[in-house]
Image (cartoon, rainbow, N blue to C red):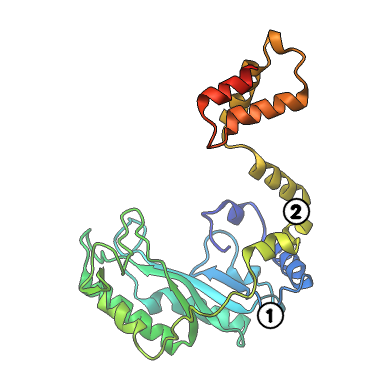
């Protein structure tokens, strides 16, 4: 929120943001969605852009479970960026966040580095060193959760697994050894893929009616939209069938009889040959 590249970053004030956060948090909490089911992460960019500071957006100790930060090393991929090591990217904002709360766990919600330290050629060695330093930084600063943005951007070779660059082959994909070694160390907890989800999307959005309660008109419009036919071909086929059956010579056909004849013509039982079907319709 302390950036200036999204519409919601420039068209509102920190007070608007805090009120909206509190409002949404309270709604879900009143619906029984507490910390055992949903964890809130208040996350900021590594530096402030625009007229407001990250501190002005602070929602308070009682309205978040995590503190979060984003940090990217753009290297020489753009004329506005330069090569920065992890401590140069994160130290300042990390210190500011700890002043807001000394009890909340820290999350590195999105981080990445390009490989172009100078010029426009990927420097695998420098990128590996950056990844090694970031792994140490995460461990030494008690960061409890981290998520690497493994997607290449315009002129940015961010990928460290499955991309076009790297110094090792890992699970049949190119990768960077520093990232592999970091994940394979004892400092990381492997995900438990057998752990069942506490609540399904259907239960959250539909069964418990939470989305309907919060946005009744929008929910109704969405349900109507989802029921709309993706094509008019079926309707047009029905009208064509009706016109073929309901001719001037059959103007006394009842609605029930017409419906049955249309069903025979359209759905046609698998054991009904075409001659018999035409005979039934023409009778």
Above or below: residue 67 compared with residue 223: below
Instruction: Give the farthest residue toward the top.
Output: 248
In the rendered image, residue 151, in percent from the top left (x then y), is placed at 37, 61
Marks 2 and 1, how far apart in space? Answer: 28 Å
Name the quadrant of the N terminus. bottom right
Q: Are marks 2 and 1 in contact (CB under 8 Å)?
A: no
> Is residue 17 something one can see in this rendering?
no
Residue at image position (54%, 74%) is 68
- Could you tell me which residue is drawn at 40 percent across and 84 percent down? 137
With 155 as the anchor, is 90 left or right in this view? right
Disc marking residue 215: 2
- Mark 1 residue crowding within 10 angstroms, few (<14) / some (14–19) / many (20+): some
Residue nearest the viewer, comparing 21 with 33: 33
User: Which quarter of the rendered picture does the C terminus lie within?
Assistant: top right
- Foreground residue among 224 and 236: 236
Residue 139 in the image: above or below residue 2: below
Residue 61, numbered label: 1
Q: Please name whichever residue, 39 or 89, is drawn nearer the observer in this view of the structure.
A: 39
Q: Residue 268's quadrant in the figure?
A: top right
Label 2 or label 1, whichever comes before in sequence order: 1
């Amino acid at each position: 929120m302390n950036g200036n590249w999204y519409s919601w970053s420039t068209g509102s004030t920190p007070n608007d943001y805090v009120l909206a956060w509190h409002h949404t948090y309270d709604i879900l909490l009143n619906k029984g969605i507490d910390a055992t089911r949903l964890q809130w992460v208040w996350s900021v960019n590594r530096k402030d852009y625009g007229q407001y500071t990250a501190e002005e957006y602070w929602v308070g100790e009682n309205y978040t479970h995590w503190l979060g930060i984003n940090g990217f090393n753009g290297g020489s991929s753009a004329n506005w960026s330069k090569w920065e090591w992890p401590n140069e990217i994160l130290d300042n904002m990390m210190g500011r966040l700890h002043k807001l709360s000394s009890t909340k766990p820290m999350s590195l919600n999105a981080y990445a580095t390009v490989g172009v330290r100078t010029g426009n050629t990927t420097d695998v060695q420098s990128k590996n060193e950056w990844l090694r330093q970031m792994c140490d930084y995460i461990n030494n600063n008690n960061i409890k959760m981290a998520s690497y943005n493994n997607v290449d951007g315009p002129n940015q070779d961010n990928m460290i697994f499955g991309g076009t660059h790297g110094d090792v082959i890992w699970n049949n994909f190119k990768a960077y050894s520093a990232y592999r070694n970091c994940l394979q160390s004892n400092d990381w907890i492997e995900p438990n893929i057998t752990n069942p989800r506490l609540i399904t999307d259907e239960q959250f959005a539909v069964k418990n009616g939470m989305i309907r309660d919060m946005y009744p008109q929008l929910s109704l419009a969405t349900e109507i939209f989802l029921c709309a036919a993706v094509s008019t071909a079926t309707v047009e086929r029905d009208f064509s069938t009706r016109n073929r059956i309901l001719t001037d010579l059959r103007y006394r056909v009842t609605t029930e009889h017409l419906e049955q004849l249309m069903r025979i013509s359209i759905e046609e039982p698998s054991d009904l040959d075409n001659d018999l079907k035409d005979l039934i319709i023409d009778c």
